[in-house]
Image (cartoon, rainbow, N blue to C red):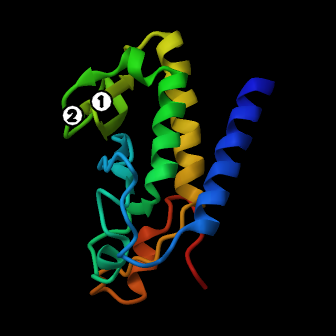
Amino acid sequence: MLELQRSLLALLALVLGAVSCASGSSSRPPAPDGLARRVTLYDYAVGRHFELVGESHTARVEYYSQKRSDAARKVQTDEVMAALLEKLGDEGFVRFAQAGRAPSQGGQLITRALEVQSDDGVRHWAVGKGSNPEERIAFNACMSPFLELYNLSQSFQAIENSEGSEYFDKAQAPGRNSRP
């Protein structure tokens, strides 16, 4: 457990350092290797996905300058994305992943998937009810730093919203009280 905490602190320090040095300009040069990195987490049970991309994959200013249908994608520096891929590899992604894209839909057996685009091409790792405990533990060890980095990453994405304030009523989780 202590090793996991140290790894997360190291990743957090790297993220904070990169964010403080990051330029908001789209003229930022790509990472030395120029790889277009992308990591996507699919949660099929709730129909959501979360995506982190490097600046060599998606130009930050141009992307955030246009309205989108959702705000699932966040743009991070190439250096931070490289560190994330290294962390995912350390936690077992390389061991369990398969070549190709993640399934477009889950089902009874597949509940979540991680999809990574890197210098190795596109690979994915899907887990669910049929996954053995060792694989589920390793998947959660990959999912945790991804979600922490995702939540720490700023996004200034405007979304298309034709519903006005009703959007927030519909987006409210079931079981919660409605707005007064």
Q: Which residue is mark 1?
A: 124
Q: Which residue is mark 2?
A: 103
Tell me the crowding category of disc 1: few under 14, some 14 to 19, or many 20 or more residues within 10 angstroms, Cα based.
many
Q: Position of residue 83 (x, y in %)?
A: 52, 41
Image quadrant assignment for residue 103: top left
Q: Residue at x 36, y 50 (%)?
A: 49
Q: Amino acid at mark 1?
A: His
Q: Residue at x 37, y 71 (%)?
A: 60
Quadrant (top left/top right/bottom left/bottom right) for the N terminus: top right
Q: Can residue 32 be seen at all in this image of the molecule?
A: yes
Q: Can residue 1 be seen at all in this image of the molecule?
A: no
Say whether marks 1 and 2 touch (CB < 8 Å).
yes
Q: Position of residue 101 (x, y in %)?
A: 20, 35
Give the Cα distance between marks 1 and 2: 9 Å
Quadrant (top left/top right/bottom left/bottom right) for the C terminus: bottom right
Q: Amino acid at mark 2?
A: Pro
Residue closer to the observer: 133 or 147: 147
In the current view of this chain or complex, which residue is farthest to the right? 2
Determine which of the numbered discs, if any, sits on residue 86 in the image. none
Q: Is residue 38 above or below residue 2?
A: below
Q: Is residue 13 above or below residue 85?
A: below
Q: Residue at x 46, y 47 (%)?
A: 81
